[in-house]
Amino acid sequence: MKILCIAIANKAKSTGGHLHSLLNISRELAKDHNVKIISFGNESSELLDSSGLYIGYCSYKLLNIFRIRKQIKKIVGEFKPDVLNIYNEEIYLLFRLLILFTDAKLILTKCGGKNPIKSQWVFADNLIVFSKENYNWFISNKKYKKSNIFLLPNRVGVVEIPSEMNQKNKKDKNSFNFLRIGRISRSYINSYMKLIDLVAQLKKDNFLVRLFIIGTINDIQYYKQIKHKITLTGIDCTLITDENKVKIASKYLYLGDCVLGTGRSAMEAMSVSKPVLVPALNSPFPILLTKDNFELYFNMNFSERSFATVEDIRQNYDKIVSLIKDKNYRKKVEEDSLIIFNENFSVLELNKKYQSIFEKATNKRKFSLYNFIYLIYCLNPFKKSIINRKVNREEKN
């Protein structure tokens, strides 16, 4: 089967979570299928190019619809895919409304995030979602009652950790090390602050603890807030914001004995048997993920939108203390992390699931008045480009 995967990558160095997911999925699918990747943006994507499946990018300006159509028609005509799997709703919309010359099945993948507002999302006949939160929203929405909705969280490969000899940053083996990998922005500031509070409390209780933070500075204001809180609490913390290190941040998972993760970063930590903390809006500290509470936080994709149970909040600090003090308990949590990963997120289970999706997906193109109106909105020169706004959001994921 020929599969063409399409994403948005506005810059050469774009490294959003949606691109990493596409990369892992495409590589795994390529073991059984003929897979190619293209991107929409202003230049070629370095990350996608590293896959060996990348055949180029389409430069675009929304007002030049005919040029976009010509580029797409050339690529699709030469490759002749059986499936077009698109990882961006606005690009999907362009394909759906402009590309009428192929019988390929059109599948949209929503890469996590909040549930859409009904009036701000496209209609799709075939839709893959990564989170239960999104899946439950779509299957209960009348607009999508005739759509094929598939839940497929498998999008992460086992992270390759460099050998100790090749590890550029070293950790103190006498201390218990916490790690947070993520954007430094308003969206994630609460999880950073609560993790710092946790490390500060453990230090106050005479535990030898250290914190590593690796992330892109999306907003200098929140970076300064984090630095100020680190100084205020007096914790031992290393901040890594160098672009070359951030773009391969998962390679530094060895720094953490326990990792605070959201979405994909939580799954990557599980892939190497790391105990994982997840944020919760109503908890003073991040919650330790276990086999018992996994489903609750997975329902919200391990996001900042999660709410902890009263029991989790009550037991959480003691469990984290046990993680530090009790080697047997830590080993059990590490083993459970890997089990959760293998059963839910590993791309090794991907091909069988995708084969089923491809068979069930349809190639019908039901007319959607809303999609047509949405395209007209995109073409409005007096509106800020929807696609550019989406690029900026996704590149921060």
Image (cartoon, rainbow, N blue to C red):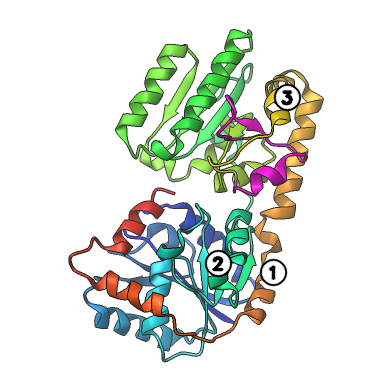
Q: Which residue is mark 1?
A: 353
Residue 194: where, in percent of width, then height?
52, 26
Q: Secondary structure at mark 2?
A: helix
Residue kind at label 3, given as amino acid type: Gln
Magenta residues, start to end: 278-301
Q: Amino acid at mark 2?
A: Ser
How far is disc 2 from disc 1 in space, using C-alphas? 14 Å
Residue in the image at 47% along x and 31% along y: 190
Residue 16 vs residue 95, the one in the foreground: 95
Q: Residue at x 39, y 34 (%)?
A: 241
**Label 1: how many Cα within 10 Å (few below 14, some 14–19, many 20+):** some
Q: Earlier in the sequence, mark 3 or mark 2?
A: 2
138 to 148, vertically: above or below:
above
Upstream in sequence: badge 3 or badge 1: 3
Asked whether residue 369 is drawn in magenta, I would say no
Picture layout, residue 39 above or below residue 232: below
Q: In this view of the protein, which residue sits in the foreground, 270 or 55? A: 270
Nearest to the eye among marks 3 and 2: give it: 3
Circle 1 SS class: helix
Q: Residues within 10 Å of mark 3 (few under 14, many from 20)?
A: few
The image position of residue 67, as x and y in percent, is 25, 81
The alpha-carbon separation of the residues under discs 3 and 1 comes to 37 Å
Determine the image quadrant of residue 308. top right
Name the residue tied to disc 2: 26
**Main SS of residues in magenta:** loop
Residue at x-position 42% and y-position 87%: 78
Where does the N terminus fall, quadrant-wise? bottom right
**Mark pair 3, 2: CA separation:** 41 Å
- Residue 315 is tagged as 3
The amino acid type, in three-letter code, at marker 1 is: Lys
